[in-house]
């Protein structure tokens, strides 16, 4: 059975897109689902979040210099592998302009490995250019991180229009997996108002899980780790475990931490074999 490919997309920067891709991938991995994280952003933040710097990158696979297995890297989580990015990817959009079926390069690259993973997460650049178009053409589902601030709502309509166009012309099976509210602050009235407005408008398409503003989520990338390896019991790490459980279909399913215990970089607080992920009530982020 083919695995699910999820593109994490928002053309607005600073909304928690890479944080979501990195930590959701880790959460799937500790729930013992084999997962591939594809860094399709030339800024390579998802790669650095796992401490990966490689000479061969997704760029090399996209231009046909190698196959994706040649650029896939192991991580400290046994069920998670990473396809890194780098600055060379900035030139890919220009180089692929004249290429035949340029919007289908990524789906061709992933075709040979898709069945090896339960989930493939694609961290997209903060734009609606050719790289993001490739991700949307290759994906089964789109996950949209949305910051709980007013300006974050303004670009949502154009993103959804782009998804509809891709669905109509390139990828009939493409669907919205859900809208994920990020950087929520319960002390901020505007944050609550934005959440209420989004839930009223999009209903069940908005995940029950809300990602709070959390210092540990911000600190973890500087240590080359996802939040689960940096501080598994932080509110940020717990919220992404909850999101993974929601996507897996059960908001109360225990998530194994055996992979954390096996990691040489795991913190002392990450060694318990498992702990239950408690469901969050609607609108509550901590």
Image (spheres, rainbow, N blue to C red):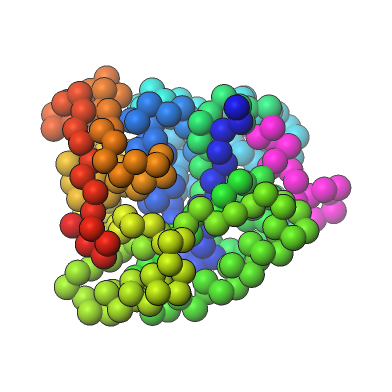
Q: Would you place residue 17 above or below residue 109 in this image? A: below
Residue 158, how many percent across, how many down? 60, 73
Residue shown at 71% from the left, 64% from the top: 165
Quarter of the image holding residue 258?
top left
Extreme residue in the left direction: 269
- What segment is highlighted magenta in the picture? 95-111
Residue 194, how many percent across, how many down? 34, 76
Question: Does residue 177 appear anywhere in the picture?
Answer: yes
Q: Is 133 or 85 nearer to us in this picture?
A: 133
- Residue 198 on the magenta span: no
Q: Would you place residue 39 above or below residue 211 in this image? A: above
- Describe residue 8's horizontal placement relative to residue 252 as left or right: right
Residue 229, how many percent across, how many down? 26, 35
Q: Would you place residue 143 above or below residue 62 in this image? A: below
Quarter of the image holding residue 49?
top left
Question: Does residue 96 appear anywhere in the picture?
Answer: no
């Amino acid at each position: 059975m083919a695995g699910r490919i999820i593109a994490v997309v928002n053309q607005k920067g600073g909304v928690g897109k890479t944080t979501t891709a990195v930590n959701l991938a880790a959460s799937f991995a500790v729930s013992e689902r084999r997962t591939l994280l594809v860094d399709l952003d030339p800024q390579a933040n998802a790669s650095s979040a796992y401490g990966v710097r490689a000479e061969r990158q997704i760029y090399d696979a996209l231009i046909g210099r190698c196959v994706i297995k040649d650029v896939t890297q192991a991580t400290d989580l046994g069920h998670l592998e990473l396809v890194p990015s780098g600055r060379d990817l900035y030139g890919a959009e220009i180089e692929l302009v004249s290429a035949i079926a340029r919007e289908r390069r990524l789906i061709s690259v992933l075709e040979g490995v898709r069945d090896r993973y339960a989930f493939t997460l694609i961290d997209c650049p903060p734009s609606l250019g050719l790289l993001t178009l490739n991700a949307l053409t290759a994906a089964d589902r789109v996950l949209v991180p949305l910051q709980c601030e007013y300006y974050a709502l303004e670009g949502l309509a154009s993103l959804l229009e782009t998804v509809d166009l891709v669905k109509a012309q390139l990828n009939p099976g493409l669907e919205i997996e859900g809208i994920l509210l990020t950087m929520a602050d319960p002390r901020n009235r505007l944050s609550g108002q934005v959440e209420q407005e989004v839930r009223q408008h999009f209903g069940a398409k908005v995940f029950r899980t809300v990602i709070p503003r959390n210092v540990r989520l911000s600190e973890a990338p500087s240590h080359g780790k996802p939040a689960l390896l940096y501080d598994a019991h932080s509110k940020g790490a717990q919220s992404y475990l909850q999101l993974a459980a929601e996507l897996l279909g059960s908001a109360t399913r225990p998530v194994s931490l055996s992979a954390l215990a096996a990691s040489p970089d795991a913190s002392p607080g990450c060694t318990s074999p498992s702990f239950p992920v408690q469901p969050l009530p609607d609108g509550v982020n901590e």
